[in-house]
C-alpha cells in the first residue's frame, strides 16, 4: 500500500532523511520508533507534503500512485491522513465547519457526492461519542482552548470521520493520560484495522503499542531505518534503549 | 468636519484617502447619518459599503447617558470606500464598533473614527479587522478623546490586518487624547500574513489552497459579526464571504 524507497529529504538544506526504505502493506500497522532528532516528524511531514521539507531523492507511492507528485490536499483526497504531533488551533472556525468542508472537498475530488449537513452531524456525533468526546466541543473553534489530550482525541475524531486509507500518526500518544491512551488506541484499531487500510504509528513509547499492536516495528536513526522486527522489538527498545538496539 | 472644501492630504483624517475618487463623489455625498441613542436605550446599526466602486458613509452618533450602541461596518468598496463615524459618549454610555476592510485590486478602504468620551464612566470597544490583497490599501484611523472631567472611562482599540500580497498595505493609527487622569485606554495593533502552520493543517485535511485560505480568513473576520442583530447577521456574513473570495482569487 505505502512504499517508501530510498527517500532522502532536507529541511533548510540540512539532510534529515538519508535513504529511508519502508513498505507498509494494506491491512497492517507499522510502528516507527527512534531517538529525538532521528527524523520521525520529518518523515511524517514529507509524506504530508509540508512546504520546507524538500525531497532530494527516492520515491513514495500510495496504492501505486506517486505521492510526492501530489499537492497536500490531493494526498488527502487520495486517502492519506496526517495526525499531527501538535494539532493546530484555528480561531474563528468551528471544528464542525472545518471537518465538513475538508471532507466534502475530498469527496468532490474523488467524484463522490457531498455529505449534507444532517448526514455530517450524525457522523460527527457518532465518532465523537466513540472517542469519549462531547460533540459540543466540535462546535468550538478548531482545537482552541483544548488540552493536549483533547487535541489528540479531536485528531482521532477527524480521522474517524474522514476514514483515510492510510494514516500517519505522529506521536498521537504524547500528552495522553492512561485512560485517554486506551480510548485513542482503541479508536485507531477501530478506524484503521481493516484489510484495505494501513497505518504508520510514530511513537516514543511502548504504551500505545500495547493497545495498538503493530505488525512490524522499525527503528529510525540518522534518517534511515536501521532495524526492523516484530512487536518484540519495541519491548527490547523499551528495556535497553536506542543506543543498544540501533 | 466641514464639508465646505475638499479635504486635502494635510487633513489628518484624510491622510490615506483616495482624494481623486473622493472628489468625484463629493458633490453627491449624502449627509451624515444622525444617530441618537436615547438615555438608557440599547441599539445597533449596520453600515455596509459593498455595492458601489466609490462609497462614503458618515455617521454622527450621540450615545446618551446609560445608553449603548453596537455599530457594525463592512467596507468592501472596490475603488474607494470610507466609513467615518464621530461618536459622542455620555455618562455611563457604551459604544462598540466591529468593522472590516476587505479589499483587493487597487482598492483604498478606510475606517475613520472619533470617539468623544465627554462624561464619566463611558466605555468604548473598537475592533477592526482588515484583509488586503493585490495592491489594496486598508486604513484605520481611530481617535479616542477623553474630556477633563470624564473619569473612569474605559476605551479599547484592537486592530489587526492580514496582508495577502506584497503590494498590499495596511495603515493603523490609534490616537489617544486624554485630559482626565483616571481612565483606561488600551490599543493593540498587528499586521500579519496567513499562518503557515494553519494553512498546512487545512491543506492536509483536503482543502485546496484557495478554499483553505478563504476558510482561515473567514475565521479571522466573521467573529466580528457574532453580536450583530439577528436580521442582519446573515447579510454581513454572506457579504464578507463574497468579498473574501474576491480578495483571495
Image: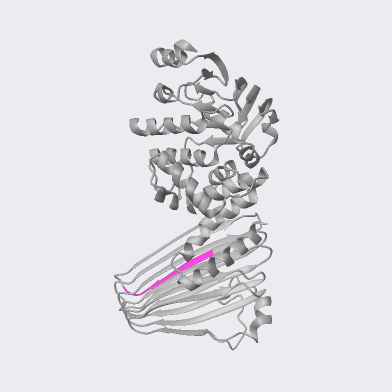
Left or right? Give the position of A186 relative to B77.
Answer: left
Magenta residue check for B178 = yes
* Residue B192 visible, this orientation: no
Q: Find residue A7 and report its image quarter.
A: top right
Residue at (57, 33) in percent of width and height? A45
Name which residue lies at 66% across and 81% down: B25
- Residue A64 in the image: x percent, y percent? 69, 28
SS assignment for the magenta stretch, majority: strand
Identity of the residue furthest to the top in this view: A244
- Say above or below: A7 vs B206: above
Q: Position of residue B171 (x, y in %)?
A: 56, 64
- Of A104 and B115, which appears nearest the observer? A104
In front: A161, or A223? A161
Depth order, front residue of A148/A133:
A133
Q: Looking at the figure, which quarter contains the C terminus of chain B?
A: bottom right
Across the whole image, how many numbered discs are drawn on residues? 0
Q: Is residue B161 shown left or right of residue B64?
A: right
Report if residue A169 is visible in the image: yes
Residue at image location 49% in from the left, 43% down from the top: A88
Vertical arrangement, residue B198 with respect to residue A216, above or below: below
Locate residue B48 relative to residue B42 in the image: left or right. right
Does B194 sit above or below residue A173? below
Task: Give the residue at x 65% y 47%.
Answer: A108
Q: Is residue A239 above or below residue B167?
A: above
Percent coordinates x, y for residue A87 in the rendering: 48, 40
The residue at the far bottom in this view is: B4
Q: Answer whether residue A25 is magenta in the image.
A: no
B152 left or right, relative to B74 = left
Magenta segment range? B172-180
Q: Looking at the rendering, which quadrant does residue A53 occupy? A: top right
Amino acid at each position: 500500500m505505502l512504499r517508501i524507497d530510498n527517500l532522502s529529504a532536507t529541511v533548510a538544506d540540512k539532510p534529515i532523511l538519508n535513504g529511508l526504505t519502508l513498505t507498509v502493506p494494506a491491512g497492517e500497522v507499522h510502528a516507527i520508533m527512534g531517538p529525538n532528532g532521528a527524523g520521525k516528524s520529518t518523515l511524517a511531514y514529507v509524506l504530508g507534503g509540508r512546504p520546507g521539507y524538500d525531497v532530494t531523492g527516492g520515491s513514495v507511492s500510495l496504492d501505486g500512485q506517486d505521492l510526492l507528485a501530489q499537492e497536500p490536499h490531493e494526498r488527502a483526497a487520495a486517502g492519506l491522513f496526517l495526525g499531527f504531533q501538535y494539532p493546530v488551533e484555528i480561531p474563528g472556525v468551528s471544528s464542525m465547519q472545518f471537518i465538513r468542508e475538508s471532507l466534502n472537498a475530498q469527496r468532490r475530488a474523488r467524484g463522490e457526492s457531498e455529505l449534507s449537513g444532517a448526514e455530517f452531524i450524525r457522523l460527527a456525533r457518532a465518532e465523537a461519542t466513540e472517542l469519549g468526546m462531547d460533540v459540543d466541543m466540535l462546535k468550538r473553534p478548531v482545537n482552541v482552548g483544548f488540552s493536549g489530550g483533547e487535541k489528540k482525541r479531536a485528531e482521532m475524531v477527524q480521522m474517524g470521520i474522514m476514514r483515510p486509507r492510510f494514516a500517519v500518526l505522529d506521536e498521537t500518544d504524547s500528552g495522553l493520560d492512561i485512560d485517554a491512551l486506551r480510548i485513542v488506541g482503541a479508536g485507531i484499531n477501530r478506524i484503521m484495522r481493516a484489510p484495505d487500510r494501513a497505518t504508520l504509528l510514530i511513537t516514543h513509547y511502548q504504551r500505545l503499542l500495547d493497545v495498538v499492536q503493530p505488525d512490524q516495528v522499525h527503528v529510525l536513526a540518522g534518517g534511515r531505518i536501521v532495524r526492523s522486527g516484530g512487536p518484540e522489538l519495541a519491548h527490547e527498545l523499551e528495556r535497553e534503549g536506542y543506543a543498544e538496539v540501533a | 468636519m466641514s464639508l465646505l472644501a475638499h479635504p486635502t492630504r494635510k487633513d489628518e483624517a484624510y491622510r490615506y484617502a483616495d482624494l481623486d475618487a473622493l472628489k468625484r463623489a463629493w458633490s453627491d455625498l449624502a449627509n451624515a447619518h444622525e444617530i441618537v441613542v436615547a438615555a438608557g436605550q440599547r441599539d445597533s446599526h449596520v453600515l455596509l459599503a459593498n455595492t458601489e466602486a466609490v462609497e462614503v458613509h458618515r455617521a454622527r452618533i450621540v450615545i446618551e447617558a446609560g445608553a449603548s450602541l453596537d455599530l457594525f461596518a463592512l467596507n468592501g468598496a472596490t475603488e474607494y470606500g470610507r466609513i467615518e463615524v464621530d461618536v459622542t459618549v455620555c455618562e455611563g454610555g457604551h459604544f462598540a464598533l466591529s468593522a472590516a476592510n476587505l479589499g483587493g485590486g487597487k482598492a483604498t478602504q478606510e475606517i475613520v473614527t472619533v470617539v468623544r468620551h465627554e462624561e464619566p464612566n463611558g466605555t468604548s470597544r473598537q475592533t477592526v479587522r482588515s484583509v488586503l490583497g493585490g495592491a489594496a490599501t486598508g486604513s484605520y484611523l481611530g481617535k479616542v478623546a477623553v474630556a477633563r472631567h470624564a473619569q473612569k472611562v474605559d476605551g479599547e482599540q484592537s486592530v489587526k490586518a492580514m496582508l495577502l500580497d506584497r503590494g498590499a498595505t495596511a495603515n493603523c493609527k490609534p490616537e489617544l487624547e486624554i485630559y482626565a487622569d483616571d481612565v483606561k485606554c488600551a490599543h493593540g495593533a498587528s499586521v500579519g500574513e496567513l499562518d503557515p502552520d494553519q494553512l498546512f493543517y487545512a491543506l492536509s485535511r483536503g482543502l485546496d489552497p484557495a478554499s483553505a485560505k478563504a476558510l482561515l480568513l473567514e475565521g479571522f473576520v466573521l467573529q466580528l459579526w457574532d453580536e450583530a442583530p439577528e436580521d442582519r447577521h446573515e447579510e454581513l456574513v454572506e457579504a464578507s464571504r463574497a468579498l473574501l473570495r474576491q480578495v483571495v482569487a
